[in-house]
Image (tube, coloured by chain):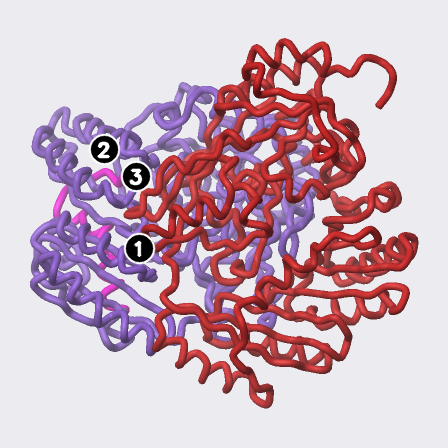
Chain colours: A purple, B red
Amino acid sequence: MDSQLVSEFHSIVGDVGLVTAREELRTYECDGLTLFRVVPELVLLPSSAEEMQAIVKICHRERIPFVARGSGTGLSGGALPVKGGVVIGVSRMNHILEVDVPNARVVVEPGVTNSAITAAVSAHGYFYAPDPSSQVVCTIAGNVAENSGGAHCFKYGVTTTYILGLEVILSDGSLVRLGGKTMDSPGYDLVGAFVGSEGTFGIVTKITLRIIKKPECTQTLMAAFNSSSEAGAAVSNIIATGMFPAAMEIMDRLALQAAEAAVHPNYPNCPALLLVELDGSAREVELLMEKVGPICTSCGAWELRLAKSEAERIAVWKGRKAAFAAVGRISPNYLVQDGVIPRTALPRILGEIDRLSAEAGLRVANVFHAGDGNLHPLVLYDRRIAGQEQQAMTLAEDILRLCVEAGGSITGEHGIGEEKKHFMPVMFSPADLDAMQRLREAFDPYDLCNPTKMFPGTDAKLQRPIAYEPHPIEKAGLAQRY
Amino acid sequence: MNERQHPIESAWTDLEAIVGREYIWPATLGDVIDEMLPGGVIAPGTAQEVAQVLQYCSSAGVAITPRGGGTKLGLGNRPQKVELVLSTERLNVVIEHAWGDMTATVEAGCTIDKLQHTLEKHGQRLAADPLWPEKATVGGLLATADTGTLRIRYGAVRDLVLGVEVALPDGNLIKAGGKVVKNVAGYDLTRLVIGSLGTLGVITRAVFRLHPIPVATATYSTSLSRTTEATKLVLAILNSQLIYTGLQVRADRTDHIVVDVRFEGIPESLQDAYGKLSKVAGSYTFAESSGDVWKARRELFAKTDNSAICKCSVLPAQIGLLCDAIFRQAQPPEVTTTLVAQGTGVAEVRLDAVRVPSLLEVLNGVRSELNRLDGTLVVQQCPVSIKEALDVWGTSKDALPLMQQIKGKFDPARTLNPGRFVGAI
């Protein structure tokens, strides 16, 4: 990059906010999807909205593309740098600006982590509901960009449900406030449009979000089944009674073995495990939990275990959250997939996945948010065997196609980013994609914000594969995936 | 109407060719919007026909006003043009109730009641209670983002919609979102069109996420005589672990305030909830009341000549201040007022005036007080003369240029509801 430009950036952010050394830039060459790598020209770490705005104004003037980055835990390559572009990290803008407990509002800077919000309000009996598994390190800006979910969004909703106001910088450097602290700001729901736009609309500099009251009581039941299909039937029957559990999760034998090997959660040894979590008033949770057990039994559950203490409950979730990374213990390599199907299609799709898995001669571990129909199939393979990686990728894509054919989605929470952009036409028509592009042009007519992501054909230079490799922060035990 | 040929007259034959002769007819007095008589009403029979009509009108320069049940036609600024009303009445089918998945796919012209009755058969509901469900349609609910008393527990309508199909002025029929509860593929065009008052496209179909119909419901109310007490009580309930599905403040005088709380669930949990409510409420005594109290919002909208209904949005802790501002500005006998506020901080206020000018004065007065609180006021229904003197949406903030950009990308010829939305979009 032109040295005059670099010194111009330097005059904005100083030494501490400027990364130019090759080896340091490599830290930013990928996000949680590690097989795509592009070394950025420059990384800028502004400490305020004013600095951020000054940076973007230069990018706009010079037509330099920029990619916003939180903690880089994304799983679809959304924070992958763009060739010839800069990365703007939000990590130094990490202050909680306002905690308004009576109104259940919190105003934060973009680099605040998801967990830090809950930590700031926990003493008042509140929490921030969306709970991606990387919540200890992932930033709220990243959550806003990806519209992050988590295990409890079946009942509580995803990020977009909780964001009321955003202050953003658009690609021309203008600072715009969308929404507000009160509900229903007049005009188009630009907050709703911005959340989940994967960094292609602008960069957030301030976020106003809602927190909610912790439930009085939470109980988690483990039910052991002989097949995932039986467990899936139990999920449907539980819902048919009119109950609304906080979470329902299924893990199959492979996933259970992996979790057991990694964190010893002491799950029942079974082909499929269902976790059902109920929360609410103590009386109601108790009465409803009495019904959940028999429903599971009638669907074939042969062992029921209720985690009564908070410590037991945390152990159960730890095992669940470890399942992704733990698969690394039972297979040299694996691909993480993220697809969604209507919940009732679960038994059929699981059967199809089994069939595809047998045909390809590759093992598939299944971990899923059963309440939402959000599947996370993990395709196990060995890269050292010639052709197996390609086979695994084909299998993973076949599973995604199954999801779309069943009326579902190619991503429930990981996003499109770099990874799935070539899959968008499988789910959307050219007219659908054109409408999305128009919205993008309205926000970013200069095509500077994360320009090569989300849409097919935007950058032919980057090729697959999409095989999974642990991210450095994962290896360090700071984050897990699910 | 001016003297030159109404653009719709030259378009009539072409429009007939799209929908069939029996589905386009001259407008009558019942079709008037803000004292403007449209040239005609068209009722396409399919979503594709809606898209064709939009495309045709967009290139022919005919303005379209999309209409569902016609219950909220007073919403918005006075349109620049009202030429052709596009009625969704023929698109009224509940296409699928996937009760096992707790989702439903429904056409835009279906009434809320018809949808709810279909869902009831499997013990489910759309957890929203919009105005006039017997007449209001799914499309109208989405276009206006009408918000009711269930919102405090189940979210706004946008939180209950999984996907939409939208006809665009360029003739494309697009879908956004999908049929599944969790989906982050592509931009959230669903949220963009919800609340856009038909200015970007015409919603032809929606997919909702559903909730079970509760086994039992109970409502409790208490009367208070000070606005500060109302704020205190609302905040105490909000700060509790009670699981209520309605929290409402009603006031028609500064010393006559009622707070309503609704619980839903299994009978055992309702008894339990009442006990806890009594503890949270301290010295205020709640007594069981009729579920009719939740119709208070609807009752505000009874039409008279010199009345205005506005939607005010403040923080929950400002509900008392909102009451104060309204009662300070609206002084009987010249202006009387009734307020129904939800615990979310979204309130609806009815003002009845002896003369229209004093109505305008009060609206401006309340709006400037709310703006000082960072709140907003949108006039939802008022005499047309008021619309000439004030912007019903209020002053637009710095996001307006972006909104205009979006409008320009989706409806460059300004075919849809021109002038009616924020910033005269």
Type of amino acid at the residue the image marks with label 2: Ile
Q: Dominant secondary structure of the magenta stretch?
A: helix
Q: Earlier in the sequence, mark 2 or mark 3?
A: 3
Q: Residue A454 is drawn in which quadrant?
A: top left
Type of amino acid at the residue the image marks with label 1: Ala
Dividing the image into 4 quarters, which one contains the N terminus of chain A?
A: top right
Q: Position of residue B251 (x, y in %)?
A: 71, 71
Note whether residue A132 is visible. no
What residue does disc 3 label? A339
Between residue A46 and residue B156, name the one nearer to us: B156
Mark toward the viewer: 3 or 1: 3
Chain holding disc 2: A
Residue pictured at 23% horizontal, 33% vertical: A399
What residue does disc 1 label? A476
- Mark 3 closeness class: few <14, some 14–19, many ≥20 residues within 10 Å: many
Magenta-colored stretch includes residue A325? yes
- Mark 1 closeness class: few <14, some 14–19, many ≥20 residues within 10 Å: few
Span shown in magenta: A314-339
Secondary structure state at the residue bearing disc 2:
helix
Between residue B241 and residue A255, name the one nearer to us: B241
Relative horizontal placement of residue A112, taking residue B258 as reference (left or right): left
What residue does disc 2 label? A399
Note whether residue B243 is visible. yes
Residue pictured at 74% horizontal, 49% vertical: B381
Between residue A396 and residue B300, name the one nearer to us: B300
Work out how far the residue at label 2 is from the one at label 3, CA to CA, in angstroms: 8 Å
Type of amino acid at the residue the image marks with label 3: Gly
Chain holding disc 3: A
